[in-house]
Amino acid sequence: MTLPDDLENRLRRSAVGAFPELGSEAPVVIQRVHERPRSTLIRCSVGAAPSGVRLIVKIPQVFARPASDRPRIVPDTPPLEKAGLEAATLGAIDRDLRRAPDPRFAAVSVIDVYEDIGAIVMTEASGAPLSGLVLRAVGRRTSGSATARLATALGSAGAWLHRFQRLDLATQRTPRFESRAEVVDMAREIAAYLAPRTTRPSAVGDVAERFSDAADELLPDVIPTGLHHGDFAIRNLLISPDGIVTAIDALGRWRMPIYDDLARMIVAIETSRIQSSSFGLALRPAQLTTMGDAILAGYGADEVDPAAVRVYAVLILLDRWAARSERRVGRAGRLASMSGTLSDRRYSLVARRLLAPRFDRSP
């Protein structure tokens, strides 16, 4: 995207407003521009080293999206509305940690919002994405230290989510899916949309049926809710060299079942790029289970039923599967057909893993 002409001047004013010691003539250096599917991230510095500050500017990609009748667990948020929501959520996280610090967690500080372009300006977080630690777990020769560091990071991520879901901001957000019946109805709606658009319609129907049975058994009639991150995935959790967790991209628009973000993390690992490119062979089933267990243990074994989370994860998986199938519509040729067949098979296998007890018994 083309950057606004006055961006450097705006960044200088924002930075000096938050850090007056920088001075009104502080130099602004744009260091990197990273284009993502739905946003552009700009890394910059304001002020001379060593007293300067490093900032991240997140600007949404605003473009017309084709009309869609795909059912969604959460509706899309208009791009220009995201900055205000994310700023409020990140600000609530920052205030909460200042009030009651925890050595396991850190937060970014929002210093400005440019409403006209939907941009949010924040301090740069320390650390690398958790996805890097997951990648190092691939293979049979993973060192004990790398495995221990991953387990600690996943546990801290679960503990972070437990605290996040209970922020005061949750009381100001609209709840969704407060009952088991709503969750089951959503799964049926997504499955009905997905089945005719996949190469494995019978598998979709089978998964939906077994999900309904498992939900009746494991999900409570009234589901506890908490503040919803919205994209709680390994790419959005930064781990510092000493293991401190900083979460980013927290929208906080809804109050959702406490299972939802936990399930999104599990599904994100199960369907990660390394898993997809290796046809599910990079991370062994035992490794996937261990990672999920570490997240749930960090969240609190007495707070949530792991079996309920894994059942709810099938709803998240169906939602992702439907989104992928929708994106595939309009493609043509043998490669697209092969890609669809392999993708559908992979999603079907993940669903069977998550519902393993139901597939181990006769229907």
Image (cartoon, helix red, strand yellow):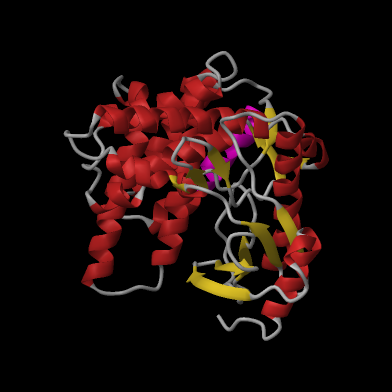
Report which quarter residue 23 is drawn in.
bottom right
State left or right for residue 210 relative to residue 69.
left
Outermost residue, bottom side: 5
- Residue at the image point whose x is 55% and y is 24% from the top: 299
What are the residue bounds of the magenta stretch? Answer: 176-191
Given residues 48 and 112, the one toward you in this image is: 48
Q: Position of residue 328 (x, y in %)?
A: 39, 65
Q: Position of residue 100 (x, y in %)?
A: 73, 28
- Residue at the image point whose x is 43% and y is 43% from the top: 130
Given residues 219 and 170, the one toward you in this image is: 170
State left or right for residue 76 relative to residue 329.
right
Given residues 336 and 224, the one toward you in this image is: 224
Looking at the image, is 16 positioned above or below residue 307?
below
- Residue at the image point whose x is 31% and y is 33% from the top: 146
**Magenta stretch encompasses residue 291:** no
Q: Is residue 157 visible?
A: yes
**Magenta stretch encompasses residue 186:** yes
Looking at the image, is 157 positioned above or below residue 249?
above
Q: Position of residue 118 (x, y in %)?
A: 71, 68
Chief SS of the magenta region: helix
Q: Is residue 177 visible?
A: no
Looking at the image, is 230 positioned above or below residue 77?
above
State left or right for residue 67 relative to residue 227.
left
- Residue at the image point whose x is 46% and y is 21% from the top: 307
Q: Position of residue 206 (x, y in %)?
A: 37, 36
